Image: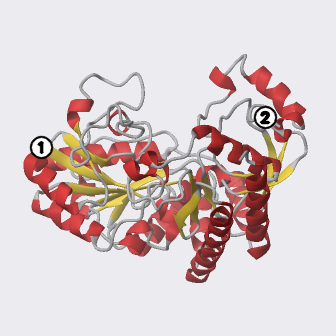
Amino acid sequence: MTATSPASQRTSPASGRLYQEATQYLPGGTSRIHYWFDPYPIFARSGRGCRLTDVDGVERIDFLNNMTSLIHGHAHPAINAAIRDQLERGTAFSEPTESEVALAKLIVDRVKSVERIRFGNSGTESVMLGVKLAREFTGRDKIAKFEGFYHGYYDYVQTSVRSTPANWGPAGEPATTANSGGLSSSVLGEVVTFPFNDLDAAERLLTKCGSSIACFLVDPLASQAGGPVPGSGYLDGLTQLCRKHRVVLLYDEVVSFRLASGGGQEKFGGTPDLTAFGKIIGGGLPVGAIGGRADIMALLDPSHGPPRVLSGGTFSGNPLTMTAGRVALELLTPEEFARLDRLGVRIREGVNRIFADAGEPFRMAGQGSLCRLNPTAEPVTDYRSLVQSAASPERMARLHRHLLDQGMIIARMGMACLSTPMGEAEIDDFIRAVGNAVDRLPR
């Protein structure tokens, strides 16, 4: 078996044919880069619970859940029933709806730092609006972000996500690098890149350039950086530094909100001024939101004259998404979070035991229902610690494909997550699949 011709592809002829057709109309055969892999991805036909069936009729356990957005898995009966009920009454209106108010209240009640909230349609849109609010509130232009942290496709955050030793600069003052073509030539000069988990460096850089920084963008558990856990007191210390330098602290909880009822900020600390949401708050439908302090959110308020920051969106706050999101969050009780936490511990301990026994250069990181298979046996404390100790990309690609052969779906770069339909049986199936996949790796 070779890495470019795994069993999962040889037995997926319908996916192969559909991919070839797709390439005639879509660049690379897809609208989403995250799930593309060589020679072609499997194409989904249906999903129910924690299982997904592809167009060839092969059923697998879905540990990716539409890039972590489906915390209740596929086609949850209660969410589907609520969507059907709303569908009969209309899918979208120019007018606001009761369902928008209900979801807003639910999030404000759960997240202590959020006093007001505005809905949109994606996590990228939420981050973009948060940056604009911070700029208007502070009268400053620059933003700060951590090296290796991903925050969507807005120009100013598509920086320093995949820096390499060839261009990343000094450890204590990382260079800002472009993560995509097509960025304005002015972008790199408006972003200050910080090392993660280094409070001394944060204080030094904020003292140096804090007076020009509008906001500091933080993901409490950044998967693309390997899921480094904030050190004890780190985010609280960063909060105090941002207050001192009058920098708006903007948490990106698009992914990490699934960690607890109050999100990553409840689990890891810190008190953001603004928080960007997405994924699970939509109940499986497109969604985004920005929430935070009432005085900052008031910049969006049209009730006292033209708002200072304009935002809209034809489908923002649409009743289908608002209804699905409300039901999804109501199903996430403290008991359900605690159960997911236990399953998360079980899967990480089991997988890491297999890697350790086999001497494999991999480690499953993560917290709660979020997991990340890292191509290193060492704990990841920041982006550079991941890159500097990483195994070859080819070995990671082989592991991903072997897991697909074993009926397990994760992201090609190792991101995975749990969903509420899962129990110990599915976790143990995954652990066994990792064991079988490791046995197939070349020595």
Q: Give neighbour class at mark 1: few <14, some 14-19, many 20+ (Cα, 10 Å).
A: many
Q: In this view, does 61 lie to the left or right of 142?
A: right
Q: Residue placed at 65% from the left, 23% from the top?
A: 28
Q: Is residue 264 left or right of residue 65?
A: left
- Taking the view exactly as shown, the residue that stands out farthest to the top is 24
Q: Residue placed at 75% from the left, 51% from the top?
A: 403
Circles 2 and 1: CB atoms closer than 8 Å = no
Q: Residue 151: percent from the left, percent from the top?
A: 41, 45
Q: Which amino acid does label 2 sit on?
A: Thr
Distance CA(mark 2)–CA(mark 1): 52 Å
**Residue wearing tag 1:** 212
Q: Which residue is more in the foreground, 199 or 384?
A: 384
For the N terminus, the image quarter is top right
Q: Which residue is more in the foreground, 434 or 96?
A: 434
Mark 2 against mark 1, which lies toward the viewer? Answer: 2
Question: Would you place residue 145 above or below residue 342 in this image?
Answer: above
User: At numbered mark 1, what does the secondary structure look like: helix, strand or loop?
Assistant: helix
Is residue 322 in sight in this rendering?
no
Q: Which amino acid does label 1 sit on?
A: Ser
Q: Quadrant of residue 297?
A: bottom left
Q: Residue placed at 28% from the left, 73% from the top?
A: 233
Q: Residue 303: percent from the left, percent from the top?
A: 27, 53
- Any mark on residue 202, and which? none
Is residue 85 in sight in this rendering?
yes
Question: Would you place residue 309 above or below residue 206 in this image?
Answer: above
Q: In which quarter of the image is residue 359?
A: bottom right
Q: Which residue is more in the foreground, 110 or 50?
A: 50
Q: In this view, does 249 lie to the left or right of 349?
A: left
**Residue wearing tag 2:** 2
